[in-house]
Image (cartoon, rainbow, N blue to C red):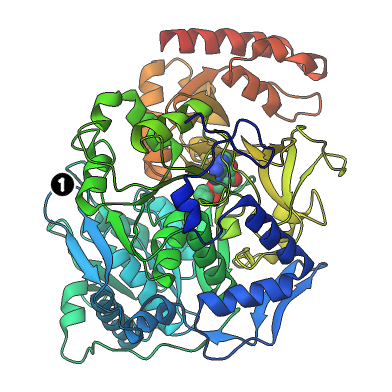
Amino acid sequence: MSQEASEGIVGALLPPEELSRNAYVKSMGEYRDLYRRSLDDPDGFWAEVAEQQLDWYRRWHTVLSWDPERKEARWFEGGVLNAAYNCLDRHLAAGRGERIAIHWDPDEPGEGRTLTYRQLHEEVCRFANVLRKYGVGKGDRVCIYLPMIPELPIAMLACARIGAVHVVVFGGFSSGALRDRILDSGSRTLVCCDAGRRCGKVIPLMRNADWALRDCPGVQNVFVVRRAGVAVEMKEGRDHWWDEELAAEDIEGDCPPEEMNAEDPLFILYTASSTGRPVGVLHTTGGYLVQASITHRWVFDVHDEDVWWCAADVGWVTGHSYLVYGPLVNGSSQVMFEGVATYPHPDRFWQICEKYRVSVLYTAPTVIRSLMKHGDKWTTTCDLSSLRVLGTVGEPVSPDVWLWYRNNIGGGRCPVLDTWWQTETGGILIAPLAGATPTKPGSSGFPFPGVVPVILRQDRTEADVDESGFLCIKQPWPGMMRTIYGNHKLFVETYYSLFPDAYLTGDGCRVDADGYYWLQGRVDNVINASGFRIGACEVESALAGHQFVSEAAVVGMPHAVKGQGIYAFVILKGEYEKLDSDEVRTDLLRYVGNRIGPIARPDVIQLAAALPRTRSGKVMRGILRNIAEGKTDRLADRETLADPGVVEQLIAGSKELLDKG
Ligand code: PRX
């Protein structure tokens, strides 16, 4: 634990020698050589990676073409491949069909399901044939609304196999959120299940889907997986049972993969944006697969003997890249877990690690914090000796949480890799490499080869060492999003208007004298609650849709377990001001839960008389943020306020509320 790194980096922890010896990238020297090469000759570097990572039906003629005006990137143009082929068929061809692809562990501890690469291939082919039978083809969007069951990756890979574009919607989202995503993506096919299971409870996914589909007349076919065995109403002609369709006589266990161009879309995934509604992030085939798979291999140093476990939900990008595409391209054996870390007890994760001899675990700081809260005793009952590398993602990880993870879970011997990336980036962009990088608690280490971050000040100049600024990325990378589905103008505005020559991540960051990156959270209106990305504007418009509400403003607040919580300032319409405030709050919480999903429910709702505004009428969010963070001594710009008295009232109201707990 007190081992100090050489390479002139003081206070960092070296990877264990044995790990480095067998690693793909063995030292900082090797990392620096790779990084230099990736900048000196990016085309050569990425071509080599693309060749090594994937099987292509036809090789590309141009590695990258980038239109800096239109912000259009095209990677591996001329290349032809299929994502499902790369995740499945080529492993069978290499005699690895009997290797376990997925150990599935259900919500309730007990019998799970194991799928070899051969079995996974067959199920994917069957569902791909079902989709084809119902007229789904290249370019069609297929919405998938499933919990963490094997049918989720199967459905995604079936889409990829026939060139359809999957649109996965997190099973924790409400019917309204599902409807918006189906409509925006123009999906005509939906895959869902009777109901999900979570902490022993039944989550009525088919009922949500039914509600959503009332407003989606374009959806022609719904495939329903039986998961919870609950009764559902099947609509004649529209709804089909998944198992019956797969078992139908005319459905074969093989399905020729569609030949896709490298730049053909692979999926759309909706994520919160800084302004307005969630945006459909579009990823294409070749570049995305290269990024997801090489980062999985090099960052975590995953080898054939490893058992990989990414504990994220496939409804978010982490599951797309590090449960589906990255590990399957690399032919890994992995765990997929349906449930929750604390159910039935706070040692559930460790039981799973022991059961499957997990060697690389990738999870979110919020999960670690929630387990820390239950005390160390839960970490000592299971055999965690199979673990060799630990990862985190999704939010900044504080040094105390990092060290607890390393010591209590990793036995002090496993490197902890804090990996930074986003839905938009497709794969990890900044992270330590397991065998190479000395780690500093709380830092994401260095940029991945080929990635050129820059920390900018508002005036577009570069920040100094240790100075916080906007984290931006200067050059295109293969896994970058190509556009916002259906709205390229919004893509350019959102990501390239503040700094025209660099992609704006929305995160604050500083780089220390050793070159380590320290991520500091979002600097825009996106809130990261429990690692879930939620747009403040989205919650505001949900609240504003409630009949009692005249106006709402939503900001992030510090939260001990969630990292960030959601703080809503709500102004009621005059006629409702006299209602009991606790009842109003309960009703608003339920309403937001129904409109977006439980994850978007505010942690604090402050009913207020007015919001602070500038003289020109703009809501002063900075002030609200400071109040929510309890930094009320810093409210410097009160002079610009139209009515300074409003702030005093808000501060008093906030204190009263927070004191009440
Ligand atoms: O704020 C950053 C935070 O998560 C945001 C991206 O969220 P999403 O698109 O949902 O993807 C999450 C999984 C990749 C980022 O803008 N974030 C992600 N990883 C880290 C992080 N913040 C700090 N440290 C990280 N390692």
- Image check: 408 left or right of 462? left
Q: Residues within 10 Å of mark 1 (few under 14, many from 20)?
A: some
Residue at 35% of width from left, 27% of height from top? Answer: 372
Q: Is residue 554 above or below residue 515?
A: above
Q: Amino acid at mark 1?
A: Glu
Quadrant in which residue 553 is drawn:
top right
- Image check: 568 left or right of 621? left
Residue 78 or residue 118, whichever sits in front = 118
Residue at 52% of width from left, 90% of height from top? Answer: 57
Residue 429 or residue 316, whichever sits in front = 429
Q: Position of residue 377 (x, y in %)?
A: 24, 25
Residue that badge 1 annotates:
108
Residue 465 or residue 15, whichever sits in front = 15
Q: Is residue 538 above or below residue 313?
A: above
Quadrant in which residue 12 is drawn:
top right
Residue 435 or residue 193, whichever sits in front = 435
Q: Position of residue 210 (x, y in %)?
A: 29, 60
Q: Is residue 528 above or below residue 216?
A: above
Q: Quadrant of ligand 1?
A: top right
Q: Position of residue 112 (x, y in %)?
A: 16, 57
Task: Say which quadrant the C terminus sits in.
Answer: top left
Query: Disc 1 on helix, strand or loop?
Result: loop
- Image check: 493 left or right of 352? right
Q: Position of residue 554 (x, y in %)?
A: 57, 31
Q: Is residue 16 above or below residue 99?
A: above
Residue 459 in view: yes
Residue 530 in view: no
Q: How many marks?
A: 1
Residue at 73% of width from left, 49% of height from top? Answer: 472
